[in-house]
Structures are given as C-alpha cells and as structure tokens.
Image (spheres, helix red, strand yellow):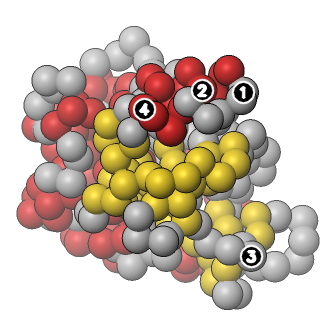
C-alpha cells in the first residue's frame, strides 16, 4: 500500500461507530480516515487491510487502501474536544480508504438488484472472514458508477472481539451469516465456494498479511492470521451455514 501524509482534517463522518473522518492528503486525494486511536484500536485496521485486500485480489470492487501518516499537530486547530483527542491519540500510521464521491449506500428496498453470483461471492467472503457487519441495518456496500463496491471491514475477523482463541473460533459455522443483507439476492454459496476457495492460496494470504504495518500488530505474529484463514478454508462449515440460510 502507498503511504500518504494527512494535510487537512475536512469533516467527521459520524455514521461510523469509531468516528472516521474525511481528510485531504499530500497527494491531493480525499480519504476516509480510520484512526488507530479509536475505541476499536489497531485490530480494526488490521481487519480492514486483510479483508479489503483479499476482496481486491478476488476481483471485488474495493476502494484503494493507503497508509496515512497523521501529525498530532493537526489536532491543535480542531475545536471539538472529542475529535481533538482522537487526532492526538492517533498520531502515526492510520488507514485511509479512497473517497468515492457521489456514491450511494446499498439499500435492499430501493429496487436495485445486485448480480446473483456477485452477491453469493460477497456472502462467501464474509463467511470466510467472519464479518458480522453486512446486514440490512448496516450494509457496508456502495453503488458507484452503477457498480457495487464493498467497504468497511473493521468488524471482520471476529475472534478479535470474543473470548475464543483464533484456533477455536476458526471452527465456528458463523451463524451470523443468516443476517447477511445479500443472502436474498445470492445464487448458490456452494458454487461460490468452488469458484473462490482455490484462489485463496497460501501465497495470496501471505501477500495480504505482508501489507499490515508492524506497529498495528503490537508484537502479534502474522502467522496467527494465516493459520486462522487456512483453518476457515479447511473447515467450510460457514459455506453449509450460508447455503442453509439462503434456502
């Protein structure tokens, strides 16, 4: 991933639980900034990178991710104390998501129907990475230029938030997939599995994990994530769970 420097705090995006913000960077680009100092901490940024770059490698439309170097001096001019504190706590490397101007949130009730195979592919990926945050309440999907884009994966890799070890959690069937916003539109999840699982190779997993900055891992070994994803692929209970829910 490229590294850019934040030059201007534009506005908070208060629909996100971790108070992301729109910022301008030194390359003149606009990015949605995800803060390492937010309540969910760097692990949410790790999940964003792992799932976002897996999605990109598998051919999903995914905004560019960049590393954003944030100077604590940007906080001085911010009048909102909560935002000032967040900026100060997040000095250093954060995550930027390319801003898609004019994009619209996916709404299952607005009549726009996604391609059934694409819907099945997204359900499959979210089952693999245990992403609980693609529901009707919070789809984390955008229509942009008449195509469907996937965004916001900080709640994935759910072992980050539970009491189970990664090894134990990898064995779960992931019943939360029943709430997936795209299940009503999806074709066979088993066929999606046949299309996608062979492409998630050890080399691909290794390349994706190499993108995670060391500072976000806090001494944790990337092998934890490699083992988790490998175990999820070997188990495949999430495929059966999603197919049953679709039925």
Mark 4 touches mark 3? (CB < 8 Å): no
Mark 2 touches mark 1? (CB < 8 Å): yes
Distance between the alpha carbons at the discs numbered 4 and 2: 9 Å
Image coordinates for residue 101, horizontal then vertical, percent? 68, 74
Mark 4 touches mark 2? (CB < 8 Å): no
78, above or below 162, in the image? below
74, above or below 182, in the image? above
First along the sequence among labels 1 and 4: 4
Q: Secondary structure at mark 1?
A: loop
Q: Which residue is mark 2?
A: 84
Name the quadrant of the C terminus: bottom right
As drawn, is 118 to the left or to the right of 136? Answer: left
Image coordinates for residue 154, horizontal then vertical, percent? 48, 41
Image coordinates for residue 167, horizontal then vertical, percent? 23, 26
For disc 4, the neighbor class at 10 Å (few under 14, some 14 to 19, many from 20) is some
Q: Which residue is mark 4?
A: 72
Q: Which residue is mark 1?
A: 80
Inspect this view and state whether residue 70 appears: yes
Name the mark on residue 102: 3
Mark 2 touches mark 3? (CB < 8 Å): no
Q: Secondary structure at mark 2?
A: helix
First along the sequence among labels 2 and 3: 2
Mark 3 touches mark 1? (CB < 8 Å): no
Distance between the alpha carbons at the discs numbered 2 and 3: 28 Å
First along the sequence among labels 4 and 3: 4
Residue at screen point 14% across, 52% down:
210
Distance between the alpha carbons at the discs numbered 1 and 4: 15 Å
């Amino acid at each position: 991933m490229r590294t850019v420097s934040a030059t201007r705090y534009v506005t908070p995006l208060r629909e996100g639980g971790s108070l992301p913000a729109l910022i301008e960077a030194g390359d003149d680009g606009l990015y949605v900034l995800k803060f390492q100092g937010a309540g969910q901490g760097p692990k949410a940024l790790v999940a964003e990178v792992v799932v976002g770059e897996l999605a990109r490698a598998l051919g999903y439309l995914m905004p560019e991710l960049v590393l954003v170097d944030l100077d604590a001096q940007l906080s001085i001019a911010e009048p909102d104390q909560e935002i000032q504190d967040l900026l100060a706590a997040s000095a250093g490397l954060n995550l930027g998501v390319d801003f898609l101007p004019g994009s619209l949130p996916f709404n299952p009730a607005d009549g726009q129907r996604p391609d059934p195979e694409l819907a099945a592919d997204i359900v499959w990926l979210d089952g693999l990475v245990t992403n609980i945050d693609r529901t009707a309440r919070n789809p984390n999907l955008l229509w942009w230029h008449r195509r469907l884009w996937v965004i916001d994966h900080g709640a994935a890799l759910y072992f980050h938030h539970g009491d189970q070890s990664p090894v134990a959690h990898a064995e779960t069937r992931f019943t939360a997939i029943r709430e997936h916003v795209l299940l009503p539109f999806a074709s066979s999840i088993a066929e999606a599995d046949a299309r996608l699982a062979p492409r998630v190779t050890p080399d691909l997993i290794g390349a994706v994990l190499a993108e995670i900055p060391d500072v976000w891992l806090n001494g944790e070994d990337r092998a934890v994530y490699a083992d988790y994803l490998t175990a999820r692929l070997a188990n495949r209970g999430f495929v059966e769970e999603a197919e049953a829910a679709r039925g």
